[in-house]
Image: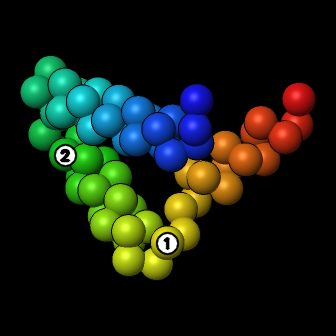
Amino acid sequence: MKIERIIRAIAGVFILVSILLAIKVNINWLWFTAFVGANLLQSSITKWCLMEDILKKFFSMK
């Protein structure tokens, strides 16, 4: 699987989990949703993604 698809999947999971946590635990979990969204926007503008760097290091450590 390409790294871009993995990043999109991770972002989607983070968003869905944080929404569920906001509903079930505390509304402040929506700040995490906003953080993920802001990082997606930032990476589309700068073409740099921290998650991509983390995943590249993780998969190269095999």
Q: Is mark 1 on a helix, strand or loop?
A: loop
Residue 4 is left or right of residue 59, and the answer is: left
Q: In which quarter of the image is residue 28?
A: top left
Residue 10 is left or right of residue 61, and the answer is: left
**Measuring 84% from the left and 40% from the top, which residue is drawn there?**
60
Crowding near pointer 2: few (<14 within 10 Å), some, many (20+)?
some
**Residue 43 place in picture, x, y as percent:** 43, 67
User: Which sits in the foreground, 31 or 58?
Assistant: 58
Q: In which quarter of the image is the C terminus?
A: top right
Q: Which mark is residue 30?
A: 2
Q: Residue 3 carries which label?
A: none
Which residue lies under the disc numbered 1? 47
Q: Is mark 2 on a helix, strand or loop?
A: helix
Task: Judge whether 39 appears above or below 7 on screen.
Answer: below
Task: Judge whether 45 appears above or below 53 on screen.
Answer: below
Which badge, 1 or 2, is on the more N-terminal residue? 2
Whether residue 40 is visible, yes or no, is: yes
Q: In which quarter of the image is the N terminus?
A: top right
Residue 20 is left or right of residue 1, and the answer is: left
CA gap, disc 1 and disc 2 = 25 Å
In the image, what residue type sits under mark 1?
A: Lys
In the image, what residue type sits under mark 2?
A: Leu
**Measuring 29% from the left and 27% from the top, which residue is drawn there?**
17
User: Which sits in the foreground, 55 or 17?
Assistant: 55
**Residue 54 place in picture, x, y as percent:** 67, 49
